[in-house]
Amino acid sequence: LSGSIPSEIGLLSSMYWGLSLYSNNLCGDIPPEVSLLSSSFPSGWSIITGNSLGTPCPDPTPTPTSDPTPTPTSPNPTPTPTLTFLPTLTLAPTPVPTVICVSGEYFDGTTCSECSAGYYSSFTSAPYPSKCLFCPAGQYNIAIGSDSCVTCDEGKLSSTDGTYCADCDAGEYAYNKTACLTCEAGRYAPQALSDECLVCSAGSHTGEPSKATTCTSCNAGTYSIISAVNCTSCELGKQSSSGSSECALCLVGFYANAEGSSSCTACSAGTITENSGSSNCTSCVEGKYQGSTGQSNCNDCEAGKYAPEAASSSCVNCAATHWSSAGSTICDLAFTGYYISSNGVSFDCPKYATCYGGKMTPIPDRGYWVDHKNLEYAGNIFKCPRKTCKGGGYNSSSCWLMNHFNTSECNEADLQCTKGASGPICGSCLSGFLFRSAINACEACGSINSYSYVVIGIAMIAILVYFGFYYLVQYCDMKDLAMFQILSYLDNGCLKVIWVTYQIIVSSSFTLDITYPYPFTNMLGVMSVFSFDFLSLKCLIKAENSYFTTLYLWCILPIIMSILILVLGWFRSRWTETNRAKIMNDHIWCFLLWTYIVLPSVSSQQLQTFDCVPMNGGDSYIRSDTSVSCESSDYKANRSIIICFVLLYHSIPLMWFLLLYRMKEALDPPIASGDLHLAIYIRKHNQHLAPFHFLFDDYKCSKWWFEIADMYRRVAFIGLIPLLSPKSTVRASLGLLLAFASVGTIRELQPYQGEFVNSVANMAQYSITVTYYFALSLSTDLIATFGLEGEKLGTFLIVFNLIVIIFVIGLANRKRKAYLKKLADKELRATQYEDARGFSSDKFQTTLESIRLNDIPSSDAIVFHFTSFELAKSARKSGIVAQKAFNGVPLTLRQPYRNTGADFKVFKSKTNEGKFPNESVLVLSLPKRYLDKLPGHEEDRGLCMISADVLHALRPTSFSAVVDEEPWIGGFAILPPQSILRSYHIMTADGVPRNGSVQRESIAPSLLKDAQDEVEDLITEVVPITSIQEYLSTMDAVREHCDRNKLIPLFHYTDPKFASLILQSGLRMSSQGQGDGGVYVSTQG
């Protein structure tokens, strides 16, 4: 610096190293700003000797007064510079000496004087200096009058008087040999140096802000740059060894968390540094670990392990039920066979589901369902009562992840339900689909409509067949065909049993929540007509949530149909003048038939409203349509209306009962006294009962109430059982108990009129029982113990349930054969009328003795009843009607030809002018205890009677041999025909002498000869019977031949060894028996 000290120096607010002023030619006073600056910078401030501070500044040099030299002219004239005129310096005139001075002297104005020590003068000519010059800095002289100075040695400087050279101190240097200056900051001088101090190298420091004598290496953990006074501590994240010129960044995996660190520390296990120069370690985040020290990265926990906390040095193994993905903080995944709930708890995989582990929720198996709207219930697997749950294994697995469990892209219906099904447990059918209980699934309305047409077509064909059968029987004289005889036994009672049986069986699949195996389901589909499952009312309503609308149709349409039937009957009865009552009765019969058919099915539809399935969270849904919540206000409002319909429909059988109860004496007439046929006859012809025959016609008189009881039994099977329990096992058990009760009830009561219908009803109950038994086995998974799984069981159930129909047909055929045999026996007995005209009394005696010994027990007596030929034939068919005169049937112990006048008086013929009826005699065997004295002839021991009271008591057991039942239905007291042992034609109508002579009708010789010729042609040898059919065909040919020739076929039974002899020589008279000398023949083949 030169000139004045700039005051701006005082404006300094910060210094990097310091301020040093030395060897400056400064003049003037030190500005106060500069003086104050030294107090602000206690370190690094120095003002060194040699600055000549505060000395007066010289006068300014005078500016020359001469004009400037003109600038030469040039083509491009150079611009004339602006001249700065310095102030004019006025010099004092130097006096001219008058003496001569030599070097080493100065002229003081008068004389030359020697320079003092420390001064010199080298002038040798005038003008001489007025004073000697002081030795320049770094030079000295000790001699007086010296003309020069001697240079000081290195590190020395001249003294202030210039007479000697003095040494500078350590930490100083001789500046220009004129002054000892302290070493500046960062410099040092172990001994005095010249001109400048040594620079302290990087990595070392002087330790002093000035006048340093040493340069010491920095300690470890510190560093310095060149010319450093002090060492600087290493920053955080850095380290240094001793004598370092800079701090090194900590390597990756190491850290320095304090200033002045001499080394970096390795990060402990569980911590890392990802970058160099770290001041601290970063903890491994949860889910990661580091097992070694001094590492730069954390590792993800392996799958199956987790790190729940930060700074983990190792991962924890998941529990046996849990799993985790790589880098997990918790084991939030399930191991295979388990699943994780929404709160992270592990559970065993629920039954009927598959658990793949991880974050997969349980996937239900086919036939099962899970609420896919709420993750909380992911482990609640529900069994689907319908075949509408396809299970979750057939869809994208992403929809079963916990984070996708309730998302819009995973449609619940598409995910778990078969086509057309939706809602909880896939228990609702979408619009355009209808549930069919027979196949236990939703089916498209188009398919159902086609199916309905098929079923209706089959029903129409059945009706046409029925009426065609009726027409053929009534008008085409086809009663004798076996097929028509079998079908004729399928009366209303039998058809009711079949209808009720299959209605219960078809509905069992839905009632019990049971899915039967193939092919039994196909059979139920075909037979769904019994439960009206083919009616597609829901398909008529093109809307979602149409449950109650459909149900109202079920409730209202039958009522409308019933009204139409009755109104149509009323109009028809008014349009005709005749048979009004019959027309109205027919329509009432149709009304009762309609209610009988539809009431159980409609009741089932109604009661399904109260069959709610409990689901998750206390919610519940109608089992038949799970789109309807049982907790909704809409359900509760409609339920009240449905209750009214239930009461209305279930009051119908009750009204039947009250109606019949008022007429119970007409239904079970006391006058019949246990006579079933008579009671039925009276009931059938009671016009007051005519409109209601449908309700009681098929039952015994005492069981007039059974139709009502059976109606409620059907409702219990079809509609009530589901309300008693939501569990299929319990329902099947209740159904099985009800089936067992039905078996016992039908077997004990035998409510139907005919034995045939009772047998069919018993078999039908067994069919229901077996079906419910296997349904119970299916619900408990015990069916495998029978070895009848899958198609085997389905086939078995088909065969067993068809046995009912087979049994009906077989039983009808058996009954037909029994009836034919019974009819044949009756007809045989009725036609066993022997021609005994001309028999002698001895002949009767021997014949009757043989009968007494062989045909009657000792408790019976042989009695005789004489009558006309016509009455005798009638008695063989229906019995002997009691005579009012005797209040019974008169009898005698006297055989023919031994009668007395008393006999003649008692047995008078109304057709023979009151004469003794000597045409026929009936031989009877009666218990002796039944015989009473004949009124008015008590003294005659030969006459007796059987009273009407006894005959009435015998009525219920007397019909087995009756051919003509008309007199019995009329309520008469009749002696049954099975008591008749023999019937004899003893005289012609015009009378024959009683002398025993025989009078025979002659045969025309020509006719006899023709017959003999034909017989000789036909019969030539003994033909063995090879088959019944062949024998019957031969007999038919014989009868046809006889009819054509007006002959009667006769049969003679003999030993086979005599057959050939008879064919050769003819029949011989018999010498056995009564010795009448005749040939025995029979009219029965």
Image: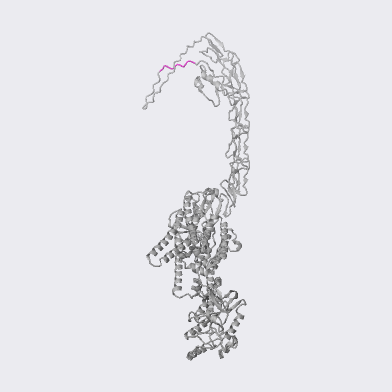
The outermost residue toward the left is 75
How would you classify the magenta stretch by its main secondary structure? loop
Magenta stretch, residue numbers: 58-66
Vertical order, 193 against 397 (above or below): above
Q: Classify the position of the C terminus by image quarter.
A: bottom right
Color theme of the render: one colour
Vertical order, 600 against 636 (above or below): below
Q: Is residue 842 visible?
A: yes
The outermost residue toward the top is 110
Residue in the foreground of this view, choosing between 204 and 51 = 204
Q: Position of residue 903 (x, y in %)?
A: 54, 80
Please state the total of marks drawn on the protein image: 0
Q: Is residue 522 visible?
A: no
Q: Position of residue 950 (x, y in %)?
A: 56, 72
Q: Position of residue 744 (x, y in %)?
A: 58, 63
Residue in the foreground of this view, choosing between 1008 and 669 = 669
Residue 307 magenta-highlighted: no
Residue in the foreground of this view, choosing between 988 and 404 = 988
Residue 63 magenta-highlighted: yes
Q: Position of residue 347 (x, y in %)?
A: 59, 49
Quarter-wise, where is residue 221 in the image? top right
